[in-house]
Amino acid sequence: MSNRIVFYDLSTGTHDNPKIWSPNTWKIRYALNIKKLEFETVWLEFHEVEPTIAKLGGKPTTTKPDGYVLCIRLTADRPLTQFSPCRTPWYTLPVIYDPKTKQIISDSRDIVEYLDKQYPATQKLVLDPTFEDEWEEAVFTNAIKTFPPSIFTVLHNRVSVPAAQHIRKVREAQFGDTLENLNTEEAVRQQWKGFENGYTNLSESYKKAGTTFLSKGDVPMWADLNIGSWLISQKFTYGEESKQWKSILEWDGGLWKKLNEALQVYEGKGFE
Ligand SMILES: N[C@@H](CCC(=O)N[C@@H](CS)C(=O)NCC(=O)O)C(=O)O
C-alpha cells in the first residue's frame, strides 16, 4: 500500500476537471512541496467536505455562522431525546491523512506542526511559534477580515449546483446579505479598498525585514506561506490576466508580486 500522504483540497471545478482555489489549502500544498513529501490530492467540492471528512473521522475546525440551532442529543445517562442548543460543526479543508501514522489532521496550522514534528529531516516551517501566532493574528485582521465577500459570488457562479447552494447558504449567513448585494459595483469597490489597505499594513513587516521572505533566508517560513496562500488564491479566482490580479501585483511597490514569484517554485504541478 502507498505511504503517500493524502491531501484533501477544495475544488471549484468538477471531479473530472478540478480547479484549485482555496487559500487555506494552498498553505499545505506549498508546505508539502517545500518539504518534498510525496502526496496525492483528493479534490472535494464545497458540499462534499463535511460528509467526506466526517466519514473519515476528521475533526471540524470551527462552527458555522448559523448561530445556535436545536440538536438532538442522545446519551446513555440521559436516555431521552434532549433538545439543547449547540452550534453546527463546520468541516473545512485542508485535511491530510498520513497512512504512515494513520492520523487524520484538520486545520492548516495543526497540519504544518504535525509535518514538522513527524518529518524532522524535512525543511522546518514553523521557525518561531510566538512570531507565527502574532503574524497569524495580523493576517487575520488584514487579509482575512478584509477578504472581499464578492469573491464568493464569483465562485458561486462557477461551481456545480450543489456546491453553489452550499456557498450561498453558508456565506449569506456569514455576511448577512445576499451574494448579489455583495457583488454590486459599489460594494466591490469598497471591499477592494479595505483589502488593499490590509495588504499595505502587512507590507510593513516585509519592508522592515528587507528580504523577500520573513524567514530572511532562501526558503520561506510558515508566515510567508500564510500570506502567500491568500495571495495566490486571487490569481486562481480571477485568472492571471484579470484586472484584479494585475492590480494586486502593483500594490506596495510590487512587493506581493515578488513574494508570489518567489513561491512559484513550490507550487508543484498537476493541480488543475
Ligand atoms: N482554520 C482553518 C480554516 C480552513 C478554511 O476555512 N478552509 C476553507 C477553504 S479556504 C473551507 O474549507 N471552506 C469550506 C466552506 O466554505 O464550507 C485552517 O487553517 O485550515
Image: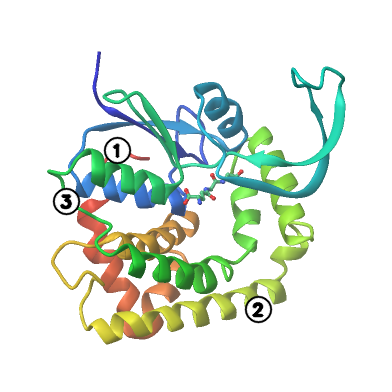
Q: Which residue is mark 1?
A: 270
Q: Is residue 198 left or right of residue 204?
A: right
Crowd rating for badge 3 (residues with CA inside 10 Å; few <14, some 14–19, many 20+): some
| Mark 1 residue element | loop
Q: How many marks?
A: 3
Q: Indicate whether 71 appears above or below 194.
A: above
Circles 2 and 3 in contact, beta carbons < 8 Å: no
- Distance from disc 2 to disc 1, alpha carbons, whole Å, reads 36 Å
Give the residue type at disc 2.
Gln
Question: Which quadrant is the C terminus positioned in?
Answer: top left
Q: Which residue is mark 2?
A: 190
| Mark 2 residue element | helix
Query: Is residue 252 among the parts visible in the rendering?
Result: yes
Give the residue type at disc 1.
Gly
| Mark 3 residue element | loop
Q: Residue at x 44, y 76 (%)?
A: 247
Pick out the residue farthest to the top. Answer: 1
Q: Indicate whether 267 appears above or below 9.
A: below
- In this view, the residue in front, 125 or 262, is 125
Name which of mark 2 and mark 1 comes first in the sequence.
2
Q: Indicate whether 162 appears above or below 202.
A: above
Q: Which residue is mark 3?
A: 123
Q: Is residue 265 left or right of residue 254?
A: left
**Res 162 → quadrant:** top right
